[in-house]
Amino acid sequence: AQKITQTQPGMFVQEKEAVTLDCTYDTSDQSYGLFWYKQPSSGEMIFLIYQGSYDEQNATEGRYSLNFQKARKSANLVISASQLGDSAMYFCAMSDSWGKLQFGAGTQVVVTP
Amino acid sequence: ETGVTQTPRHLVMGMTNKKSLKCEQHLGHNAMYWYKQSAKKPLELMFVYSLEERVENNSVPSRFSPECPNSSHLFLHLHTLQPEDSALYLCASSQVLGTGRSGANVLTFGAGSRLTVL
């Protein structure tokens, strides 16, 4: 069975600083995908970044980068130069070889001026 | 309209009511999903429809009944719900590559329907 763990329930970060959100996973699949989604207070889940299990390079999308350490089964999200609009709930998710997505419990990020 | 649209955004119902949640996607995707998001719990996958066939039903009580009349529309029919069913119900769609093939099965979510059961 797959399992996604986000151990940080909440974090404060100052504007313009970088923040790292932790995510560890457990799976017996050889092929899987790792995702990060952002959920602002409006409720909509917004896709941020994707990393495939066979991708050798860490994924980057603008200010978001995914620190993928396969041996440690971790897929941490790094947000650089935080902005006030980054305040939201962040979810790590994993898909199995059939594409089914399972989510972690989430980390609430609050960006302060 | 673009993306995934959910209606209503908010719904209050009694335990004996019958109501439906609607989801519509304008992305040409071939799979649609219902997720339940309760307070302090991870998102729970409820149902998956791929090419209009239900391929996943995660032991959801029968008081929740999904319907997928075509690849663009998904409904969740609600009947005799319990107060613990109060939650945010999120619909999503994706383009599934095919069984056994991994890849970026990126789900696009709607804004959700906030359900309160009295």
Image (tube, grey):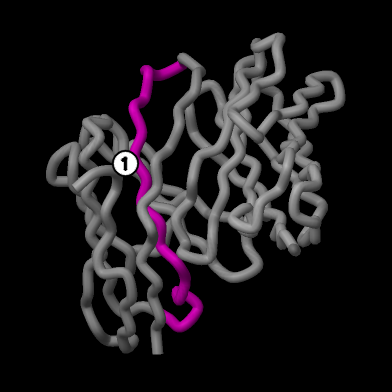
**Residue under numbered circle 1:** B32
Residue B96: image x %, image y %? 36, 25
Q: Please provide the residue range marked out in magenta.
A: B82-100
Q: Residue at x 76, y 40 (%)?
A: A23
* Magenta segment includes B92: yes
Q: Quadrant of residue B51?
A: top left
Judge whether residue A57 is colored magenta. no
Q: Nearer the viewer, residue A13 or A113?
A: A113
Q: Residue at x 27, y 31 (%)?
A: B29
Residue B49 occupies which quadrant of the picture? top left
Q: Nearer the viewer, residue B99 or A86?
A: A86
Local secondary structure at mark 1? strand
Q: In the image as oriented, which residue stretches furthest toward the left?
A: B69
Residue B107's place in the image compared with A84, above or below, is above
* Side (left or right) of B55 relative to B30: right
Q: How many marks?
A: 1
Q: Label 1 lies in what chain?
A: B
Q: Position of residue A92 (x, y in %)?
A: 65, 42
| View extreme (right): residue | A72
Instruction: Say above or below: A110 vs B27.
Output: below
Which quarter of the rendering shows the C terminus of chain B?
bottom left
At a point 67% along the width and 54% down the height, the residue shown is: A106
Give how far across and how far down residue B12 sits, in percent: 33, 84
x, y percent for residue A16: 76, 48
Q: Would you place residue B6 above or below residue B48 in this image?
A: below
**Residue B93 placement: quadrant:** top left
Q: Is residue B4 left or right of residue A74?
A: left
Q: Going 45% across and 74% down the picture, which residue do you hit?
A: B85
Looking at the image, residue B80 sits to the left or right of residue A43; the answer is left
Toward the viewer: B78 or A71?
A: A71
Q: Say which amino acid is labelled 1.
A: Met
